[in-house]
Structures are given as C-alpha cells and as structure tokens.
C-alpha cells in the first residue's frame, strides 16, 4: 500500500500545489462566516457557511446537499460518489461550526476578517478548528478530480461544538454512513511539519453546581460568622476536587498510563503558555496527564464581581465544572462519581442543586488495520518525517456513533490544527503549508486504499 504513495508522490505534490491558491481563497471566505452554533448567536451566518460548503463540494465535482436533521438543530452537509467496482468506501468528516470569538478574549484582528500575517499563518476563528478540515477534504477531492480510486461519502457537521442533533440521525439511518474507513480531519500535529496520528480521545463531562446558604444578602458584620457564606462554601467544595499535587481527587475515576511516547515538557510549556517558574501539576508522564487521565477544571463561576462587591454574605453561588475523562471510560458513570463527590463534601448542610449535566464519551481508534498502515506511510511521504501516535484531550462525540453504524471501519484522525493554532482561544490560526501537506497525505492514502479489495 505504501508503494502507491511513493510512486505518485511527485505528481501529487505538483497537483496539490497548483490547487492551493483556490483552496486558500475558499477557506478565507469560509472563515469570514461567523458560524457559531451556540444558542443566542445569529443563525444566518451558520446557514451561510453551510451553503458555502455545499458550493465548495459542488465545485469539486460532487452533488452535495444540505442535510436537514429530523431532530432539529443546524443542518449538516452531505455528498456521495461511488468508486470503482470493488473499491472500499471512505467517509470524510469535518465540521463548519465554530466556537464564539469575543474580541475581549484577546483578538488582535477581527476574527471574521481573516488575514495572513508575516508568519505565513491564516488568522481567524475556525481557520483551524475545523474549517481547515473541510479544506483538506475538498483539496484531496479536487486533486483526484474524476479519478477517484475509492467510493467517497462526505459528512460536514454544523453542531460539533454544541449539542449535536446529528448523532440521533446517524443512529436512525446507520446504513447511510457505512464505510470501510472514516477520515476525521479535526485533529492536528504537535508542531508544524512533524506529523502525528491521533489514536485516542478523552471524553468530556460537565455539570453546574449551585450552593445556597441564606435567604438573602445579609450584612457581613452583623451576621457574618455563624451564617455560612455560599461563595465560601462553594470554594471549599471546588478545592476538594484536586489533591495537593493537582491530581483529580474524585474517587474511582478511570485512569491509565499512556502506552506510547511522552510529550516533551519544554514543548508543552512553550505551547501551553505556562508562566515561567509555575509548576506543572499532577502525577505521571505528561502524555498520561494529557491523554489518558481525567482532569477537572472549573470553567465558570456565577457570583458577584469584584466591581460589584458589597459587605454582605453571599446567599447563592454557582460553578460550571468540566471534567475530561479517560478514553474508554463510561461518561454517565464518571459524571455520577463527580456528582457524588460534590454532595459528599458539601459542608454545613448547605443546599446544593446539580443540573445541566452533560456527558460525551472518549474514543479509542481500532488499531492494526491496513488503513492505519497506509496512513502512516502517506504521512511519511508527504512530510518526509516518520509520524508518531498521540492522544488528544479533545473529544468528538459523533465518533462512537459512527463506529456503531459501521463496526468494521478503521478511523484515521488527523488534520492541520497544530498546537500553535490556539483553537478555541484568541488569534486562532492555521498554516497553509500544513493544509497542503495534509491534502497530499490524504490523496496518497486514498490512492493506497484502492489496493485494499
């Protein structure tokens, strides 16, 4: 299978290079759509991005369509083309929706006026996550044109960043999504130019915990002391979620040692932005802490701000607690452990309400198949460097549903979202060279898969 990648490398690189100006023009236009699928954001840009993705695929030779989901929500995009007799079928996945991008997050330029800066990277919300994945798929289809060596199905989701309705659709119509190989272009390399394959994803759970202690705000001098303050009560509960070393302190959470190579600490410090002399927390290798061990974070608190602070006892306070869980862990069981912990550590019989519980599983890609072997060879040829295998702290909830719909499928998780892309943060970006190399790799992989019959 690797032989096909070697034979076609020069021609593939030349063809892809010639397509890149058009690919980047399309990506720039797509990034200009504020396609945030979160509640409260305007719907017009989301539908506009969906329509533009349909147009991109149509200009790539596919009869693409907007796929309206029966359960509601924003539509997906669907396209399909059969391959030669006996050839395998490949399903390509990415998503066109994005995270919010408030200017106060620290954006230097308008997140929806994409621009290429001096470092050569394209800046804008969604440039990497995950509109670059769409560019990779479209680029590989255009490079192959009418010579598709395999059957292709294209699925571009519109709600990956929020509560997706696509999951229920796939469960209802599993045959439509049956494929031999799933190409998931919603990942990336640790560094530009150094290829990786992602083989395991952590899952994600979350809940909101609300604490109430007094009926109304009370003068802290007149009543403070015997009466517990809700914010102080909540802070005690949240502090109990980690031990002194920074490990999750919730009893019974699934965890295991990462079986592959470790993550270089200096690289992690550079990319994460941990301040000088600030200690890293937790036990175990960096790879274990990042990819196969749970982590708990408080991602929001509702309480009076410093500017609005008064000398009163706080009657109620809430926090949003997010917990990434180990690949293979059962989400409902893990979040139940988190709930039980918070209730068990509640002091002074404070009133506690837990709501907005969310749970999505991690993913373990099937290993040892011919597509994985071909993908490694394709990356090696496209980059000139042998790829490594990594995990990811991120999650893509749809993957387990796709695996259930097509139990024998292999999953290839890759993309152009290198760790400098700052996805979900300010000044998100993608390097065109990464997109180009990934298109080359994907074309080589598709050519190689034609030999699997």
Image (cartoon, rainbow, N blue to C red):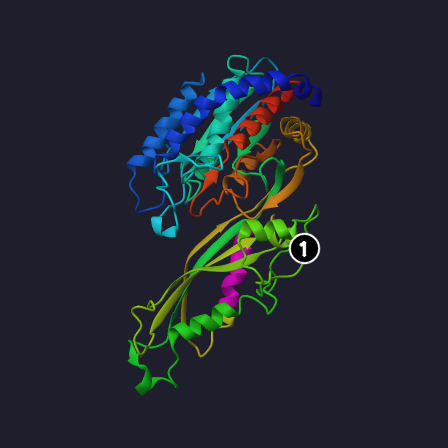
Closer-to-camera residue (193/181): 193
Closer-to-camera residue (359/259): 259
- The residue lying at 31 percent from left, 35 percent from top is 45
Residue 434, compared with residue 215, is above or below; it is above
Q: Is residue 156 left or right of residue 193?
A: left
Q: Residues within 10 Å of mark 1 (few under 14, many from 20)?
A: some
The x, y position of residue 213, in whole percent, is 37, 76
The x, y position of residue 230, in whole percent, is 38, 74
Furthest toward the front, the residue is: 118
Residue 305 seen by the camera: yes
Q: Is residue 151 left or right of residue 283?
A: left
Residue 344, compared with residue 205, is above or below; it is below
Q: Quadrant of residue 151?
A: top right
Q: Quadrant of residue 450?
A: top right
Q: Quadrant of the C terminus?
A: top right
The x, y position of residue 26, in whole percent, is 41, 26
The span picked out in magenta is 328-342
Q: Which residue is mark 1?
A: 285
Closer-to-camera residue (420/164): 420
Magenta segment includes 187: no
The secondary structure making up most of the magenta span is helix
**Is disc 1 placed on a helix, strand or loop?**
loop
- The residue lying at 32 percent from left, 86 percent from top is 221
- The residue lying at 69 percent from left, 33 percent from top is 386
């Amino acid at each position: 299978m690797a032989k096909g990648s070697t034979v076609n490398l020069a021609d593939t690189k030349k063809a892809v290079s010639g397509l890149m100006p058009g690919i980047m023009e399309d990506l720039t236009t797509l990034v200009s759509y504020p396609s945030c699928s979160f509640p409260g954001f305007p719907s017009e840009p989301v539908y506009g991005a969906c329509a533009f993705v349909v147009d991109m695929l149509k200009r790539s030779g596919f009869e693409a369509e907007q796929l309206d989901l029966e359960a509601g929500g924003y539509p997906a995009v669907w396209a399909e083309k059969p391959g030669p007799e006996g050839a395998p079928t490949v399903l390509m996945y990415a998503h066109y929706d994005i995270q919010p991008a408030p200017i106060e997050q620290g954006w230097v330029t308008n997140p929806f006026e994409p621009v290429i800066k001096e470092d050569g990277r394209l800046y804008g919300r969604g440039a990497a996550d995950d509109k670059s994945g769409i560019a990779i798929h479209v680029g590989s289809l255009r490079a192959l044109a009418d010579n598709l060596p395999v059957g292709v199905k294209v699925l571009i989701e519109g709600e990956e960043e929020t509560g997706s309705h696509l999951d229920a659709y796939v469960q209802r119509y599993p045959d439509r999504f049956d494929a031999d190989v799933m190409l998931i272009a919603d990942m990336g390399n640790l560094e530009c130019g150094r290829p990786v394959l992602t083989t395991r994803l952590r899952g994600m759970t979350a809940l909101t915990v609300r604490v109430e202690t007094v009926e109304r705000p009370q003068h802290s001098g007149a009543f403070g002391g015997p009466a517990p303050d809700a914010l102080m009560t909540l802070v005690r509960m949240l502090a109990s979620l980690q031990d002194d070393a920074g490990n999750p302190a919730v009893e019974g959470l699934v965890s295991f040692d990462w079986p592959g190579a470790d993550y270089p600490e200096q690289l992690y410090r550079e990319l994460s932005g941990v301040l000088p002399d600030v200690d890293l927390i937790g036990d175990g290798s960096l790879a274990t802490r990042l990819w196969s061990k749970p982590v708990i974070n408080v991602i929001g608190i509702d309480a009076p701000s410093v500017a609005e602070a008064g000398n009163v006892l706080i009657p109620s306070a809430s926090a949003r607690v997010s917990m990434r869980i180990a690949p293979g862990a059962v989400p409902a069981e893990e979040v139940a452990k988190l709930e039980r912990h918070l209730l068990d550590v509640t002091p002074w019989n404070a009133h506690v309400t837990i709501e907005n519980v969310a749970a999505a599983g991690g993913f373990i890609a099937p290993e040892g198949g011919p597509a994985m072997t071909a993908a490694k060879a394709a990356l090696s040829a496209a980059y000139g460097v042998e790829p490594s295998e990594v995990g990811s702290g991120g999650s893509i909830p749809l993957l387990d549903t796709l695996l259930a719909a097509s139990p024998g499928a292999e999953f290839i998780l890759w993309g152009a979202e290198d760790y400098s892309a700052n996805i979900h943060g300010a000044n998100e970006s993608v390097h065109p060279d990464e997109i180009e190399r990934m298109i080359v790799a994907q074309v080589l992989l598709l050519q190689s898969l034609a030999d699997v019959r």
